[in-house]
């Protein structure tokens, strides 16, 4: 297979070291070539795994058997940018960092702020459904992707959605690809809707005594007169790592016109206490908050709960050696450990989840006691049926979704 | 044409919903002969009205056993023939499933049965400082289930997004009667985004019985402006300039002279009858900074030669202004016996182009076309006025509509911004998507509905035999 690929793609092919389960890595420079790689993989009965900057490979379940890796980093162009329509179409291998720079020249932004923002590719961020603090105000990838083209098993390109922000023509197939870990096929191009850069940013840092006070503060901020852009909760270990006081910390942030930002910061301080940060310090802390859930860690998880359960959950987790940052307004809790967790510690986590609405997803090596993507959902059979229908020969390694069988 | 229900089927359905849960007499069925797309009419074989998810699932099982097609129906406000029972079938009406099941204000979601009226959700949550953001003009009648089916929009989508951005999950009854929960109140569920594809599926995946909707915090205040312009071009250029200035109003709505006239006659709001276009621009948010933003918007209007910019000074004035916009279609009834509301999208920068094209098309087909639309996101609603008793004029309306939609696609837009494909846009959809794209969509549909009994012939033709049945021109001319 390696020889075949080398003959066709020449210097775009590399052979990885033995024992990685990867037969060859191909980094095409053109979309048509990417389609050809997919077609060849299917024709020769190989798995095909799509990779970008490889920042999140530990999130999906491992693939079965030798795979061909389709490296999308060579497909990183802007296809079409329309600042007056606030839309942009890019190839999936473009890094978020490059995309951010292109948009900044027109004072625009993508309201998706996952960790590893500079290196991570658009395709990888979408395939893993990664996100960051501002999801509280703007939603996640599914809320800002308006169109996509994808590569089918036979190598052809299929399109869904379009280039305009209002569009109900046909099914939004592209939504299925977000969070699919490449199991429906590679994402080739993405069309996003954009926003203008905010005029100003501000934050207030609070240190609640305990979970009860933390929840009161969050509920108060959400029900009060301000409209936060993000609400971040850190446990003591994470706060310490970020060079804040090593205690449970709540950061409430605003992005708006300058008057509204300063008014809201004052309003929060008046109602809840805390310390308002200057624009410079806000910018610095924001970058840290954004990056905190990223980075390689020997063990980690992402829990999705109701927002009202977050503070109690984070407090009960304090006995485990975890750094925790939560998008508290969304109920999303990220935990990272510097050492692999013991089975008994995973059991504690699983036990806590059993009493709560929501799900737990493991990042990194999966222990015996915790399924990678949490308790199986009642609708899993539909996702699996869709995958089988779209990829009957299982070229795109459906086992990476952690489904049984 | 209604097919006489087989007595077996009728008995089996009545056993589930009782005699009062079924409508099958021809006189009563006539009420259901069309939805908001009045050009095409077709009476269903029967209408079944289950009163709960469980009962609806039993109905679906009966229909599955008999191999009968079905059409989910909320309030029947579809403007694209989404509820048209092409080739026969049974309506499953959600009008008895209208309970609000749960409201969680802390976690900002509500769980409602599919027949709950859109506006009722906001009415139930408003005093808690929350509302349901997607607000289509028909929100006093249309249902949440229907909104989810069409990924409904409305004037405030510019800032707040469309239905899919506010749908957390749903209870779907598959065509074979199985009940499935997709999504839920917690975010990022494992597996594929089934909620995401369900929204906008136009009833082709089964019956949506319940929906978990996201609730949005109410804005503290509004500034609602009305810009009066001497030309549609000036107004559309204003829209582009506001966006370019980095301002995201919560709404930017345009009405042209014909609409202004009709609305003014009906509501006497004080609209200027001689203006070519008015632009409603609404900002919402906090008091702090909003006046400065409003001033910038006023300045942009002036730079684009607006004759005047009015401000709604009180809540009452704001409400009255929106009433005129949201009931514009009702007011149009004064202009002609019938009207056909089109729904297309172009990139915002192309708004002047499409409006010029619409004017040229009106001349070409000797029709009157009025324009009211969501200028902020390029979503146009040309309203073609005619008399449906005049078959020749009706034919011209359909031709003109097709040309306008084709031009939308040519300009980089879409054949539907919010009304959906229904039966109306089966052909235009092919302008946007290749055969491969449509094949992929069919594949997805077949996963949910392998027998193709769920709202058949909608979104795309599912068989060659339906081509003749679908030509609305023929129907209207009958």
Image (tube, helix red, strand yellow):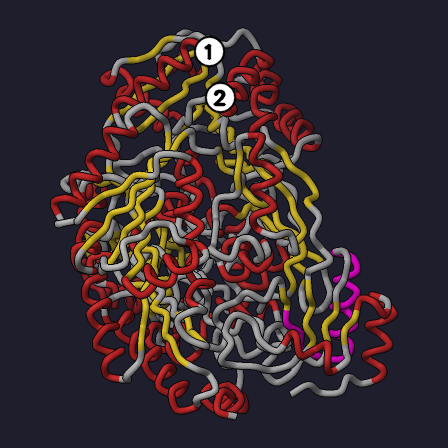
Q: Which residue is mark 2?
A: A224
Task: Bin the neighbour count of mark 2 within 10 Å (Cα to Cα): few under 14, some 14-19, many 20 and up.
Answer: some
Distance between the alpha carbons at the discs numbered 2 and 1: 9 Å
Q: Residue at x 52, y 74 (%)?
A: B81
Image position, residue B400 (x, y; %): 32, 80
Query: Label 1's element?
Result: helix
Q: Which residue is mark 1?
A: A271
Query: Label 2's element?
Result: loop
Chain of the residue where label 1 is placed in the rendered structure: A
Q: Quadrant of the C terminus of chain A?
A: bottom right
Depth order, front residue of A229/A323 = A229
Q: Main secondary structure of the magenta part?
A: helix
Q: Is residue A143 visible?
A: yes
Depth order, front residue of B354/B430 = B354
Q: Earlier in the sequence, mark 2 or mark 1?
A: 2
Image position, residue B129 (x, y; %): 53, 30
Task: Determine if the magenta segment contains residue B63.
Answer: yes
Quarter of the view holding residue A50: bottom left
How many numbered tags mark residues here?
2
Q: Residues in magenta?
A: B53-71
Quarter of the view holding residue B455: bottom right
Report the side of B31 relative to A146 (left or right). Answer: right
Task: Bin the neighbour count of mark 1 within 10 Å (Cα to Cα): few under 14, some 14-19, many 20 and up.
Answer: few
Q: Are marks 2 and 1 in contact (CB under 8 Å)?
A: yes
Chain of the residue where label 2 is placed in the rendered structure: A
Image position, residue A263 (x, y; %): 33, 18
Report the side of A92 relative to A360 (left or right). Answer: left
Image position, residue B269 (x, y; %): 38, 50
Q: Residue at x 63, y 72 (%)?
A: B71
């Amino acid at each position: 297979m390696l020889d075949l690929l080398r003959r066709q793609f020449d210097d775009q092919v590399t052979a990885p070291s033995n024992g990685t389960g990867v037969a060859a890595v191909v980094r095409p420079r053109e979309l048509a070539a990417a389609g050809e790689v997919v077609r060849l993989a299917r024709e020769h009965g190989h798995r095909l795994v799509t990779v970008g900057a490889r920042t999140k490979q530990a999130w999906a379940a491992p693939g079965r058997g030798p795979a061909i890796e389709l490296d999308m980093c060579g497909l990183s162009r802007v296809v079409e940018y329309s600042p007056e329509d606030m839309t942009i179409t890019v190839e999936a291998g473009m890094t978020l960092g490059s995309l951010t720079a292109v948009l900044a020249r027109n004072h625009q932004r993508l309201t998706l702020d996952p960790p590893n923002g500079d290196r991570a590719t658009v395709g990888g961020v979408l395939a893993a459904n990664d996100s960051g603090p501002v999801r509280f105000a703007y939603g996640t990838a599914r809320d800002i992707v308006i169109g996509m083209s994808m590569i089918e098993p036979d190598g052809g390109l299929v399109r869904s959605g379009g280039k305009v922000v209002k569009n109900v023509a046909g099914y939004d197939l592209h939504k299925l690809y977000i969070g699919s870990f490449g199991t429906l096929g590679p994402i080739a191009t993405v069309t996003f809707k954009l926003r203008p850069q905010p005029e100003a940013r501000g934050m207030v840092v609070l240190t609640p005594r305990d979970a009860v006070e933390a929840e009161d503060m969050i509920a108060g901020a959400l029900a009060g007169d301000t409209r936060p852009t993000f609400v971040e909760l850190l446990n003591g270990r994470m706060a310490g790592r970020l060079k804040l006081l090593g205690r449970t910390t709540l950061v409430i942030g605003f992005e708006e016109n300058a008057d509204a930002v300063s008014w809201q910061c004052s309003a929060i301080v008046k109602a809840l206490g805390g310390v308002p940060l200057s624009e410079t310090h806000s910018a610095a802390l924001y970058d840290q908050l954004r990056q905190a859930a990223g980075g390689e860690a020997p063990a980690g998880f992402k829990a999705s709960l109701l927002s009202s359960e977050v503070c109690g959950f984070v407090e009960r987790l304090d006995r485990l050696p975890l750094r925790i940052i939560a998008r508290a307004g969304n109920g999303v809790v990220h935990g990272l450990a510097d050492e692999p967790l013991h089975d008994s510690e995973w059991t504690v986590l699983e036990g806590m989840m059993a009493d709560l609405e929501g799900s737990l997803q493991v990042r990194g090596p999966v222990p015996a006691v915790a399924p990678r993507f949490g308790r199986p959902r009642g609708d899993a059979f539909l996702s699996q049926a869709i995958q089988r229908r779209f990829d009957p020969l299982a070229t795109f390694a459906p086992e990476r979704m952690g489904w049984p069988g | 044409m209604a097919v006489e229900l087989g007595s077996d089927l009728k008995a089996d359905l009545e056993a589930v919903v009782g005699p009062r849960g079924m409508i099958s007499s021809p006189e009563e069925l006539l009420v259901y002969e069309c939805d908001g797309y009045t050009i095409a009419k077709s009476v269903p074989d029967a209408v079944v009205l289950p009163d709960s998810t469980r009962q609806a699932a039993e109905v679906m099982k009966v229909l599955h056993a008999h191999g009968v097609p079905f059409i989910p129906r909320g309030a029947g406000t579809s403007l694209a023939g989404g509820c048209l029972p092409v080739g026969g079938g049974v309506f499953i009406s959600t009008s008895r499933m209208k309970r609000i099941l749960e409201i969680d204000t802390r976690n900002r979601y509500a769980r409602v049965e599919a027949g709950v009226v859109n506006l009722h959700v906001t009415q139930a949550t408003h005093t808690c400082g929350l509302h349901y953001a997607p607000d289509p003009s028909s929100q006093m009648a249309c249902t949440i289930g229907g909104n989810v089916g069409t990924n409904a929009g409305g004037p405030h989508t510019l800032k707040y997004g469309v239905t899919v951005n506010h749908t957390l999950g749903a209870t779907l009854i598959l065509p074979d009667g199985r009940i499935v929960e997709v999504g839920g109140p917690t975010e990022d569920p494992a597996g594929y985004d089934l909620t995401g594809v369900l929204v906008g599926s136009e009833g082709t995946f089964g019956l949506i019985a319940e929906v978990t909707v996201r609730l949005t915090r109410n804005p503290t205040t509004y500034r609602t402006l009305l810009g009066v312009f001497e030309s549609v071009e000036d107004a559309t250029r204003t829209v582009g300039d506001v966006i370019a200035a980095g301002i995201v109003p919560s709404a930017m709505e345009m009405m042209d002279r014909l609409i202004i006239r009709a609305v003014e006659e009906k509501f006497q709001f004080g609209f200027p009858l001689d203006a070519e276009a008015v632009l409603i621009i609404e900002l919402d948010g906090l008091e702090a900074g909003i006046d400065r933003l409003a001033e910038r918007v006023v300045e942009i209007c002036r730079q684009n030669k607006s004759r005047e910019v009015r401000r709604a000074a009180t809540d009452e004035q704001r409400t009255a202004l929106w009433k005129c916009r949201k009931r514009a279609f009702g007011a149009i009834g004064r202009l002609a016996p019938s009207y056909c509301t089109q729904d297309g999208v172009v990139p915002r920068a192309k708004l002047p182009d499409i409006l010029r094209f619409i004017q040229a098309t009106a001349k070409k087909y000797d029709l009157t076309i009025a324009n009211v639309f969501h200028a902020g996101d390029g979503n146009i609603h040309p309203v073609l006025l005619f008399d449906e008793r005049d078959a020749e004029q009706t034919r011209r309306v359909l031709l003109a509509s097709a040309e306008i939609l084709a031009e939308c696609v040519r300009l980089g837009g879409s054949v539907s911004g919010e009304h959906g494909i229904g039966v109306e846009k089966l052909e235009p959809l092919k302008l946007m998507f290749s055969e491969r794209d449509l094949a992929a969509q069919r594949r997805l549909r077949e996963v949910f509905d392998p027998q193709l009994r769920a709202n058949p012939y909608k979104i795309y033709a599912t068989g060659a035999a339906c081509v003749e049945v679908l030509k609305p021109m023929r129907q209207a001319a009958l």
